[in-house]
Image (cartoon, rainbow, N blue to C red):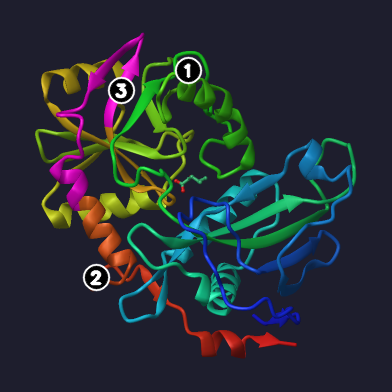
Amino acid sequence: MQFRLQAMPDDGPVRLPDPLGFGRVFTRRTLEQRYETSGGWGEAVIGPAGRIALDAAANIFHSGQGIFEGTKAYLRPDGRVQLFRPDANAARFNASAVRLAMPTLDPTDFVDAIDTIVSLERDWVPPGEGASLYIRPFLIGTEATLEVRASRAFLFSILLSPAGPYFASGFQPVGIRVEEHHVRAAPGGTGAAKTIGNYAASLFATEAARVDGYQQVLWLDAVERRFVEEAGSMNIAFVYGGSEIVTPALSGSILPGITRDSVLRMAPDLGHPVREALLDASEVLRDIASGRISEVFCMGTAAVVVPVGRIGRHGKDTVVGAGEAGPVTRKLYAALTDIQYGRTADPYGWTRIVDPEAALSRCYA
Ligand code: COI
């Protein structure tokens, strides 16, 4: 696929704030491609980042057709830049698009689009532990109509954001609280799709948990309010007997995390059996209290792997182990980030080094 490159104003060298924070700083270029039901996908244009002009009646504001992805580019020790499993993001993006009655993209075009814009913006990939260029592809309905039906016009765009660790505290244990009243997603709903509405639905409970000193909520299933689903915007796993990694099975209302999938694939090679199961929250808390569960961690693209230090329920906290990051969590974090940053060989074929020359050859003026 070819990309039209628009002229850019000369804004001088890249200067990044310190600390970077997460998702607050953006590079100067963005990619945009429009879709019309009548004509299919139009030209993909890489040009100055800025504002999107939309009709006030645009579908996204009223019927909310909106999906996104999150993936990252990492600075390798040899100075080159690499992506991590962008093909998995392409597959999930298309699955989300189908669920929301939106058009899909050719997976190769999706990955080429990321590779091309990241190559052009490679000076923005920040150095340092926990730092990366966070990549946010998204797709929204743009047709101006208040009718509740699928949009006939869409905008695909990619934003790039040099970012530090998702949690300002970095690889430090977080506190999560079991959410008893609200649910993130229900069977038959959109929980397995990365749609903006899922995040909107999570905010009330998350803000309430924050006020009480927790970073995230532990979501339970919508039917019985009994089984563990996700932790905030991440997947969650429990370490049994100091070794076995157990995570909720994908129920249809759980997002199939790419970090989750990576951990499940790597863990056996690191000596840790994995199991996907239905996990009763009360039993989990009992197992933490008795020491059967020694570690709990969350998994997501933004935060990678984060230890959970305590879980609150009914006004009481259950501390996980000593409330610190445990050895299995540390090992997984190190093994995964070593591959992501290109510090070690990648036996899984997950990484793709961007090639700025090849990227330029895909561009025209
Ligand atoms: C992730 O990457 O783990 C997330 O889903 C959080 C992101 C939406 C910032």
Q: Nearer the viewer, residue 133 or 258?
A: 133
**Kind of residue at badge 3:** Ile
Identify the magenta region.
Answer: 309-331
Q: Of helix, strand and loop, which one carries label 1?
A: loop
Q: Is residue 289 above or below residue 235?
A: above
Tell whether position 312 is magenta.
yes
The residue shown at (48%, 84%) is 355
Q: CA distance from mark 1 to mark 3?
A: 22 Å
Where residue 204 sits: x, y (%)? 57, 23
Which mark is in front, 1 or 2?
2
The residue tagged 1 is: 223
| Corner quadrant of residue 169 | top left
Callouts 2 and 3 close, C-beta under 8 Å: no
Q: Position of residue 58 (x, y in %)?
A: 84, 46
The residue at the point 36 percent across, 22 percent down is 227
Q: Nearer the viewer, mark 2 or mark 3?
A: 3
Mark 2 falls on what kind of element? loop
Q: Depth check: 132 or 191 in front? A: 132
Label annotation for residue 347:
2
Are the residues flagged by discs 1 and 2 in contact, CB closer than 8 Å? no
Q: Quick check: 307 above or below 354?
A: above
Mark nearer the N terminus (1 vs 2): 1
Location of residue 14 with respect to 133 vertically, above or below: below
Q: Quadrant of the N terminus?
A: bottom right
